[in-house]
Image (spheres, helix red, strand yellow):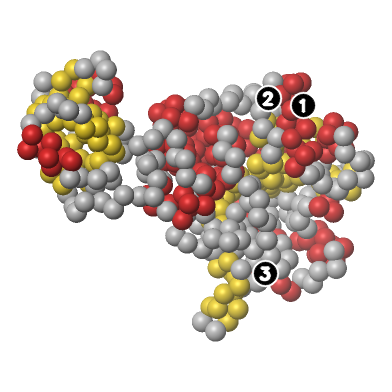
Amino acid sequence: MQRILSTELSAHVGATVRLAGWVHRRRLLKSVAFLIVRDAAGLAQVVVAVPAVRARVEALPEETVVEVVGTVVANPTAPAGVEVVDPTVRPLGPPAVPPPFDLYRPVLTASLPTQLDHAPTALRHPTRSAALRISAAAVSGFRATLDARRFVEVHTPKVVGSSTESGANVFALDWFGRPAYLAQSPQFYKQLMVGVFERVYEVGPVFRAEPHDTVRHLAQYTSLDVELGFVTDHRDVMAVLRDTLAGMLAAVADRAGAALDTLGVTVPPVPAEIPAVHFTDALTIAGAPADEPDLAPAHERALGEWARAEHGSDFLFVTGYPMAKRPFYTHPDPARPAYSNGFDLLFRGMELVTGGQRLHRHADYLAALAARGEPVEPYVGYVDAFRHGMPPHGGFAIGLERFVARLTGAANVREVTAFPRDLHRLTP
């Protein structure tokens, strides 16, 4: 008999079926026992009345893996309006050791450190697994949206030979006796691949050895990177980002509806044109000093409130960040060279995406490095490619975990990360 999932029971009323999953909860009443079985799709209620089967159920702790064969009947009070009666129950492994928290409760009450210490089990809780389902749907939407726009998925090295992109904040390792580093981003490689495919994207891990210990930072996270050629300026990149976000959220609504319901989350609309303000105006709106070189989290929150009040939008572009705060490969604003053709996208008052137009002329790279007092040698393999013809291009990167945390209202990005890596955590 082929196994079915809990969500398929309603299509089999009157039939004998086989379920398999985990003992989610047992309710042992005087005359009857209820066994709640959890599988990848949801919960199924099994009614146990035969004393011998009841005795077996009583001996199976929560989280034990079992197989149930029984008859499906309609019952409006049961989950999804159906339940399984006259069952046989067979364990598929030894009795489980109970976890240090109750997974059958609606809310996982254990502290976040306890959940992370026991992540393989804590992630079984519907609220934790729901966030990961939303994450998976978002990535699916990211890929589908870009595939439909002639982007090519690429895979770039995660071990590199030079710690150049962001200074010393890298993880060093030994590479057959030579120094090497975990890549901080695919930035250089995705730019080079524009010279091959014109439009590329990547989904992959990035590593930042920055000693942040906040609710929004991880030392390893998943970056959704995009780069496209033959742009006029950063506004072409912003338009692609807008469509990408809309595609991601549409996929979440379509593929992860049950997960959204579990968390009580509504997918926000993406405006046809996301409102945008220049960095100098953003400082005024946020009440920051005019000479502030960057936006602090408090400024981002103020801007998020402004975007919601003035434009009814959860999203806001801040453009024209000072060149002094942008990487050397950023293209300056031709009309205001002290400011960049770069942008951040704020989502509900938090920076979610950084992007912009890049330099594309070899001479401009040499000049940009010289202006910052940096030698060319560490960048030769990257910069030399621009000698051989590169179109005007730009791109962006979305932090997946931060996106999901902001969408679901999680207070800490670790709540939506399966096995987070940060300043303190290398296990499990």
Q: Which disc number belongs to residue 412? A: none
Q: Which disc number belongs to residue 163? A: 3
Residue 225 pos. (x, y %): 59, 48
What amino acid does circle 1 point to?
A: Trp
Spatial CA distance of label 2 from label 3 is 38 Å
User: Quadrant location of the C terminus?
Assistant: bottom left
Q: Earlier in the sequence, mark 3 or mark 1?
A: 3
Residue 258 pos. (x, y %): 40, 28
Q: Which residue, as the protein is rendered here, is positioned at the far front?
A: 30
Q: Secondary structure at mark 1?
A: helix
Disc 2 vs disc 1: which is toward the camera?
A: 1
Q: Which residue, as the protein is rendered here, is positioned at the far bottom?
A: 177
Spatial CA distance of label 2 from label 1 is 9 Å
Q: Secondary structure at mark 2?
A: loop
The residue at which mark 2 appears reads as: 313
Disc 3 vs disc 1: which is toward the camera?
A: 1
What amino acid does circle 3 point to?
A: Ser
Q: Residues within 10 Å of mark 1 (few under 14, many from 20)?
A: some
Residue 1 versus residue 80 in the image, above or below: below
Residue 81 lies left or right of residue 305; in this view the side is left
User: Quadrant location of the N terminus?
Assistant: top left
Residue 181 pos. (x, y %): 60, 70
Residue 101 pos. (x, y %): 40, 45
The residue at which mark 1 appears reads as: 306
